[in-house]
């Protein structure tokens, strides 16, 4: 029996999570779900989109599955998704991007994994408005390199932050029998910050010599190579900003948001979620594709070492998509979220999935 926190989220989140619960149950794995509410719906009664009991549960169970959560624009609330990653120190975001027969895409046979740093870099939130006292202080330190009155964002990168993300990428590569890690930065321009990332990555790579290959690419060149020769790459590790951008690029390579799963990992816990958002225009319509959240749950099962169930669940999803009879609109079908989930459950129960 595993204790897992379930955050259904808002928008299409609750209907997607209901499907995931049924499919996981059909694998036979025993999970005691601790369901807690976060997002715009609970905000109306709790006064906050992230009540304390959500974090308490995530910290207690150390493993969480989360539906998407809307970030309301202009209400002053920061993103619950970002807050969760920050509060739980989930420093690594892992996004496997794999082609599946039956999912339309310009590319075939893609099998890439993005490992993105989640806490530092230009996303650390250290920004100063143009003309502020802080911006003026930095301007004076920059000795003429900053145009007066500029708004300024700071890009902090620590040795510790670089080391733990690169190590996560190499450990992932070993665990999942991958062959190579590619570190991606713009170190030719940002010699201290991105330069540190490479310096640390080279040190970490030495510890895996003979097991996992290591190489480096500049981010602009990497974007071009990914759309020209994606088969050359395997596990890709990046600082926060480049990681955010390349995650979406790679999701696009495999047919879009409906099939892109994600895992957020830290030393003290893990949270699994789809890459896509809450798709509020489809909320309650039994329309959206459950695949991304289902594949995130497959990653969760692997994380709790239920490898056989993870494999069977993955194969059942792949088979239903390949058959194309009971799939959602974005995969060219007419099935609803629930019906696609039921088809996957049926495969699992029939033991058809290998
Ligand atoms: P979105 O991912 O919700 O939707 C983008 C497009 O993709 C829409 O056209 C939608 O219809 C489609 N889509 C998304 N998921 C799908 C699925 N499972 N099946 C089929 N089609 C799907 O992105 P958005 O509209 O930019 O964001 C909506 C809200 O979600 C925003 O408030 C945003 O902040 C939030 N968001 C949350 C997360 C998260 O919870 N981690 C991630 C991204 C965005």
Image (spheres, rainbow, N blue to C red):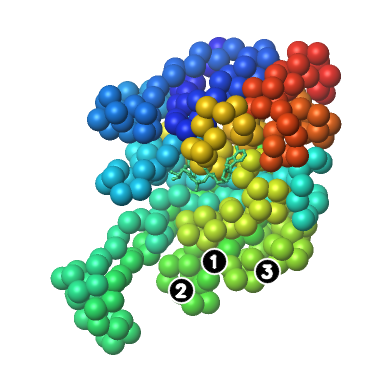
Q: Do tag 1 and tag 3 residues touch (Cβ < 8 Å)? A: no
Seen from the viewer's position, the closer of residues 199 and 104 is 104
- Residue 3 drawn above or below residue 76: above
**In the image as oriented, which residue stretches furthest toward the left?**
133
Residue labelled 2 has its Cβ within 8 Å of some atom of ligand 1: no
**Label 1 to label 2: alpha-carbon separation:** 9 Å
Sequence-wise first label, 3 or 2: 2
Q: Position of residue 48 (x, y in %)?
A: 28, 32
Q: Position of residue 265 (x, y in %)?
A: 50, 39
Q: Residue 309: name its quadrant.
A: top right
Q: Position of residue 238 (x, y in %)?
A: 54, 58
Label number found at residue 190: 2
Residue that mark 1 sits on:
185
Residue lying at 73% horizontally and 22% vertically, measured from the top left: 344
Residue lying at 65% horizontally and 48% vertically, measured from the top left: 256
Q: Nearer the viewer, mark 1 or mark 3?
A: 3
Q: Residue 41: name its quadrant.
A: top left
Seen from the viewer's position, the closer of residues 89 and 85 is 85
Residue labelled 3 has its Cβ within 8 Å of some atom of ligand 1: no
Q: Position of residue 78 (x, y in %)?
A: 32, 45
Q: Do tag 1 and tag 2 residues touch (Cβ < 8 Å)? A: yes
**Label 1 to label 3: alpha-carbon separation:** 14 Å
Sequence-wise first label, 1 or 3: 1
Secondary element at tag 2: loop
- Residue 161 drawn above or below residue 319: below
Left or right of 55: which side holds 167?
right
Residue lying at 70% horizontally and 48% vertically, measured from the top left: 255
Residue that mark 3 sits on:
224
* Other-residue count near label 1 (Cα within 10 Å), few / some / many at <14 / 14–19 / ≥20: many
Q: Is residue 211 visible?
A: no
Label number found at residue 101: none
């Amino acid at each position: 029996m595993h204790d897992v926190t379930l955050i259904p989220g808002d928008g299409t989140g609750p209907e997607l999570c209901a499907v995931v619960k049924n499919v996981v149950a059909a694998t036979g794995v025993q999970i005691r779900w601790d369901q807690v509410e976060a997002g715009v719906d609970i905000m109306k009664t709790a006064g906050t989109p992230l009540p304390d009991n959500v974090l308490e549960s995530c910290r207690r169970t150390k493993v969480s599955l989360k539906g998407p959560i809307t970030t309301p624009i202009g209400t002053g609330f920061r993103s619950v998704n970002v807050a969760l990653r920050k509060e739980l120190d989930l420093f690594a975001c892992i996004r496997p991007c794999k082609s599946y027969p039956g999912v339309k895409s310009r590319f075939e046979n893609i099998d890439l994994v993005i490992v993105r740093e989640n806490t530092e870099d230009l996303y650390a939130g250290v920004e100063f408005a143009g003309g502020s006292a802080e911006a003026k202080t930095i301007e004076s330190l920059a000795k003429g390199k900053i145009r007066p009155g500029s708004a300024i964002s700071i890009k902090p990168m620590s040795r510790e932050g670089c080391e733990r993300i690169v190590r996560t990428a190499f450990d992932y590569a070993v665990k999942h029998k991958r062959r190579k890690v590619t570190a991606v930065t713009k170190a030719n321009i940002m010699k201290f910050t991105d330069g540190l990332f490479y310096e640390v990555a080279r040190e970490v790579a030495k510890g895996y010599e003979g097991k996992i290959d290591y190489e480096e690419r500049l981010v602009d060149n990497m974007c071009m190579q990914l759309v020209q020769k994606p088969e050359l790459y395997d596990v890709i590790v990046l600082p926060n900003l480049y990681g955010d951008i390349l995650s979406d690029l790679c999701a696009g390579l495999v047919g879009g948001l409906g099939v892109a799963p994600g895992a957020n990992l830290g030393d003290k816990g893990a949270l699994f979620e789809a890459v896509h958002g809450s798709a509020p225009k489809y909320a309650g319509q039994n329309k959206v594709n459950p695949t991304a959240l289902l594949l995130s749950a497959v990653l969760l099962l692997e994380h709790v070492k239920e490898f056989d169930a993870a494999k069977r669940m993955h194969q059942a999803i792949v088979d239903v998509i390949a058959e194309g009879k009971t799939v959602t609109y974005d995969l060219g079908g007419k099935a609803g979220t629930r019906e696609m989930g039921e088809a996957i459950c049926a495969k699992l129960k029939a033991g058809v999935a290998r």
